Image: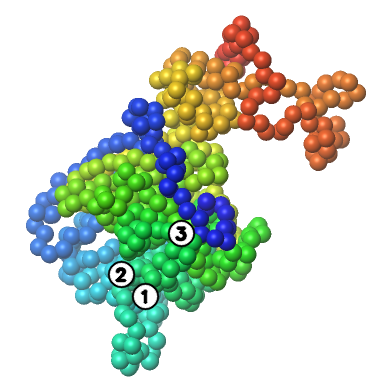
């Protein structure tokens, strides 16, 4: 879905096979793509301060530096959320703290010791949201306006300077307030930034979405599009028959970077869990790589896809209310409340289904105490660091390609009761666990091979044999058997003058001529001319093990 630029609005999530619960499919909790890992209460000193709070508590996660923060009235605390240690305490702020954000400094900050800037907002300023960009710009949502904090270092003539600029109100409406009343006032609740395309989005408390172009260098700002909830509803209903409750309100927005999709740019989530995907490009947009930033400026704002939530969890008769979401590469995390005392988190993942044309996700539901304040998935992706600043980064390689070096990821949920840690298990690790629990001809293994196909199954088996992932003989032998049963037999693909040989660049053969010489398809979902019996399989298995042992000894 995210890989196509469709001229019409498409939909997904209504078919039974578009959501997969691995625990139900395999009948084993160890084979779920998400699993509970650890829980930390707040550090003891922090719990003591919470008991003394008089007016306001806020908290969040800075995943870039693996720190959590919490403000208790005018006191600010930082600690490492992955180890629940290294608590730091700042009490020099007199006013009540409402928001804290970590941002990159501007390029003119040449001091190598300054890596980040901490922005602290107090209650003397009505602020809803704070966010920073890779270029060091700081944007603030204040009532019905979008502000930017302009800051600069001090010189020997004057000290540091900081002021704010209103991007959404002109001078006339400032000096003649009556003009503002002629239009409906809507508070800006959320800001989302796409640093790969230099686009900023805002969400109002009446579900209005605005699109701002930050320019090809990320240093300017111009409002490009304005879309109300009514406009979005009309656009969707012109192509899809969606129930009114699913489109009642939009509660969160998540920018989709170009490393995830070249067409879908924004993900909006309604209070009932429906996801709406938008593009800022026209239907005729066709990317020619490399894409210049100047050619990727937003020109429109249109719905390209809607995704229904799993009906057994988010059906309209369930009474569920979604209040927070987080998009992390191939994962989508959603927090919802059933009542004041019951909170659940649903984790979705498309990691297993990266090479399937349909939009399929696995999911897992975890109930816990308290409400969700912040979500982070580590380690973070850093693939765009080598892309030139004038080029839009291309789609990142999926996790299944690099999973041999990163078997698991950690999902951190900061709640009002503590930090919940979950593990996201890679397809390779699930494959290894399958080999240790079930035979290769079991229902569970065959279903998993249907998800990935023979080619990817063989790659995972070979990866286990070439690394130290086979922690016991059973897993090792099962991986060999997978290669024998799914890999087929070697096939000579090129013949010269009646003889047989494999292709080599020294044969002065053009790669373009390979199609004429190819005896079988380059890629096949099933082995070609494959004949097997138990005796041959056993012999091949022994030869492979002898070769592996010889390789290991060297």
Q: Residues within 10 Å of mark 2 (few under 14, many from 20)?
A: some
Of tags 1 and 2, the one toward the viewer is 2
The label number, if any, that marks residue 205 in the structure image: 2
Residue farthest to the right? 497
Q: Is residue 367 visible?
A: yes
In this rendering, the answer to whether 30 lies above or below 2 is above
Whole-percent x, y for residue 131 in the image: 37, 65
- Of marks 1 and 2, which one's residue comes earlier in the chain? 1
In the image shown, does 15 or 298 lie closer to the viewer? Answer: 15
Whole-percent x, y for residue 82 in the image: 30, 43
Q: Decide: marks 3, 1 in contact (CB < 8 A)?
A: no
In this rendering, the answer to whether 375 lies above or below 118 is above
Q: Secondary structure at mark 2?
A: loop
Of tags 3 and 2, the one toward the viewer is 3
In this rendering, the answer to whether 341 lies above or below 194 is above
Q: Is residue 469 visible?
A: no
- Of marks 3 and 2, which one's residue comes earlier in the chain? 2
Left or right of residue 24, residue 85 in this image: left
Q: Residues within 10 Å of mark 1 (few under 14, many from 20)?
A: many
Q: Secondary structure at mark 1?
A: strand
Left or right of residue 272, residue 386 in this image: right
Q: Residue at x 83, y 38 (%)?
A: 513
The residue under label 3 is: 240
Q: Residue at x 39, y 80 (%)?
A: 168
Residue farthest to the top? 535
In the image shown, does 154 or 501 lie closer to the viewer? Answer: 501
The residue under label 1 is: 146
């Amino acid at each position: 879905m995210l890989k196509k630029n469709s001229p019409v609005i498409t939909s997904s999530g209504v078919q039974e096979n578009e959501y997969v619960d691995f625990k139900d499919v395999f009948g084993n909790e160890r084979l779920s793509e998400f699993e509970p890992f650890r829980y930390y209460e707040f550090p003891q000193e922090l719990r003591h301060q919470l008991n003394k709070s008089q007016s306001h508590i806020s908290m969040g996660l800075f995943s870039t530096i693996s720190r959590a923060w919490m403000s208790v009235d005018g006191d600010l605390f930082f600690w490492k959320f992955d180890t629940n240690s290294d608590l730091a305490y700042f009490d020099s702020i007199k006013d009540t703290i409402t928001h804290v954000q970590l941002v990159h400094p501007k390029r003119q900050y040449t001091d190598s010791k300054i890596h980040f800037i901490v922005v602290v907002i107090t209650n003397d300023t009505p602020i809803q949201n704070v966010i920073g960009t890779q270029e060091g710009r700081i944007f603030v949502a204040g009532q019905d306006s979008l502000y930017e904090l302009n800051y600069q270092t001090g010189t020997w003539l004057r000290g540091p300077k900081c002021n704010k600029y209103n991007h959404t109100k002109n001078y006339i409406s400032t000096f003649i307030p009556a003009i503002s009343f002629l239009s409906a006032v809507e508070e800006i609740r959320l800001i989302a930034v796409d640093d790969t395309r230099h686009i900023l989005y805002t969400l109002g408390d009446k579900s209005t979405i605005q699109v701002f172009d930050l320019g090809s260098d990320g240093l300017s700002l111009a409002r490009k599009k304005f879309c109300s909830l009514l406009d979005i509803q009309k656009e969707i209903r012109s192509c899809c028959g969606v129930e009114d409750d699913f489109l009642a309100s939009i509660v969160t927005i998540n920018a989709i970077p170009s490393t995830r999709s070249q067409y879908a740019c924004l993900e909006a989530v309604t209070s009932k869990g429906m996801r709406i995907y938008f593009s800022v490009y026209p239907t005729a947009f066709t990317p020619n790589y490399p894409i210049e930033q100047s050619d990727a400026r937003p020109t429109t704002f249109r719905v390209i896809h809607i995704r229904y939530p799993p009906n057994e969890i988010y059906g309209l008769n369930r009474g569920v209310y979604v209040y927070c979401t987080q998009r992390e590469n191939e994962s989508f995390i959603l927090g919802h409340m059933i009542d004041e005392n019951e909170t659940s988190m649903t984790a979705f993942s498309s990691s297993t289904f990266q090479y399937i044309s349909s939009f399929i996700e696995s999911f897992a539901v975890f109930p816990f105490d308290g409400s969700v304040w912040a979500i982070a998935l580590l380690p973070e992706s850093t693939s765009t660091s080598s892309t030139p600043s004038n080029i839009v980064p291309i789609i990142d390689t999926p996790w299944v390609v690099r999973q041999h070096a990163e078997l698991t990821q950690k999902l951190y949920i900061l709640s009002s009761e503590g930090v919940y840690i979950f593990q996201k298990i890679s397809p390779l690790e699930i494959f290894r666990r399958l080999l240790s629990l079930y035979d290769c001809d079991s229902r569970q293994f065959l279903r998993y091979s249907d998800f990935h196909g023979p080619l990817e199954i063989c790659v995972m088996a070979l990866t286990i044999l070439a690394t130290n992932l086979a922690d016991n003989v059973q897993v090792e032998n099962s991986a060999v058997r997978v290669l024998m049963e799914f890999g087929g037999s070697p096939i000579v693909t090129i013949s010269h003058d009646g003889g047989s040989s494999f292709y080599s660049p020294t044969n002065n053969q053009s790669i373009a001529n390979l199609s004429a010489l190819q005896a079988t398809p380059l890629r096949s979902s099933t082995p070609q001319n494959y004949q097997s019996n138990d005796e041959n399989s056993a012999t091949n298995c022994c030869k492979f093990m002898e070769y592996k042992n010889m390789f290991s000894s060297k």
